[in-house]
Image (cartoon, rainbow, N blue to C red):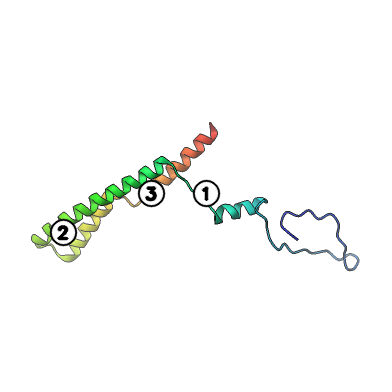
Amino acid sequence: MFGGTNVIQTRPVTENEPVFALVTSTGFLTTKGSLVRDILYPKEINFKFYTDGYKFVGIMALIAILGFCCTVPLMIQIGTTVPNLIDRSLDLLTICVPPALPAAMTCGVVFAIQRLKKQ
């Protein structure tokens, strides 16, 4: 028996005994099947905003790497300790490229899509 099949008639083995069936597979045309299909094969999202966001993050990462390369020799020259050097360098990277930026961009895209669907 397949998921979404309508049972028209059953024949019990003995009287007053319930009939059981086992669903062996679910097709993609059912509600659950379309959910499984969307999870297994997601549609590619190509928004200009999305690609521009990745370009922005890449440029900020390049600025962070450039700042890192300029800061490390100066900090070594003034005699900064290694743990302090690592701490300041990682601070520089996280200030230039905020870790929550991709999540914020994704939320922005989702809300924009919802607003467009209403219109």
Q: Relative to residue 11, is residue 55 drawn left or right?
A: left
Q: Which element carries disc 1, helix, strand or loop?
A: loop
Q: Quadrant of residue 50?
A: top left
The location of residue 106, given as percent across then percent down, is 43, 46
The location of residue 118, given as percent across then percent down, is 54, 33
Q: Relative to residue 88, is residue 115 drawn left or right?
A: right
Mark 3 touches mark 2? (CB < 8 Å): no
Residue under label 3? 102
> Nearer the N terminus, badge 3 or badge 1?
1
Find the distance from the CA under tag 3 to the CA under tag 1: 19 Å
Residue under label 1? 43
Find the distance from the CA under tag 3 to the CA under tag 2: 27 Å
Q: Relative to residue 13, is residue 85 drawn left or right?
A: left
The type of residue carrying mark 2 is Val
Find the distance from the CA under tag 1 to the CA under tag 2: 43 Å
- The single residue placed furthest to the top in the displayed view is 119
Residue under label 2? 72
Q: Which element carries disc 3, helix, strand or loop?
A: helix
Of 54 and 18, the residue lying toward us: 54
